[in-house]
Image: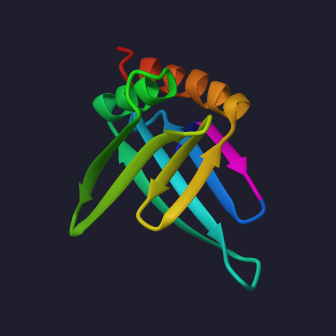
Amino acid sequence: MEQLVLNKAFMSKTGCLKLQYNEKTKSIYLHAGKKKEDDSWDWVKTKIGDAEAGDILNVIKGKFEKISFFHKFKDQQKRTWINMKDDLLWVRIEDYKKSLNPGEQRVFEILLEKAIVASNAA
């Protein structure tokens, strides 16, 4: 059973980015979704570790312009791209993408920092 203590969705009409933290597994996840023609949603998710989370924060804080990383689970490998362009933070997991405006970026930054701390707590 999942024990999500963080489950924040950043929605738009056709795209969504979710940041989740599972307390039981001490795991941080990013989900990207896109709305299909029938108004249902299609999702892809990836697990991120400390190094990836730190690099995402570095993009938000302007230390890097862009990063990318792979996550392999069983036989599936997913690539994630994060980049800043024209004050928008773009998050793309495979072919699913969502941008965050400066206000959303700040909320995302705070929540991601809290997830990093929680995932490393004793």
Is residue 1 positioned above or below 34 on the image?
A: above
In this view, the residue in front, 24 or 33, is 33
The percent coordinates of residue 1 (x first, y second) are 50, 50
Region of the chain picked out in magenta, as a range: 6-12
The percent coordinates of residue 30 (x first, y second) are 49, 47
Return the residue found at the far bottom.
38
Q: Is residue 71 left or right of residue 33?
A: left
Q: Residue at x 60, y 53 (%)?
A: 98
Is residue 54 positioned above or below 1 on the image?
A: above
The percent coordinates of residue 31 (x first, y second) are 52, 54
Verify whether residue 99 appears in magenta: no
Verify whether residue 9 appears in magenta: yes
Q: Residue at x 48, y 33 (%)?
A: 23
Quarter holding residue 121: top left
Give the prevailing secondary structure in the magenta stretch.
Answer: strand
Q: Is residue 75 left or right of residue 40?
A: left
Is residue 104 positioned above or below 13 on the image?
A: above
The percent coordinates of residue 122 (x first, y second) are 35, 14
Q: Residue at x 62, y 48 (%)?
A: 99
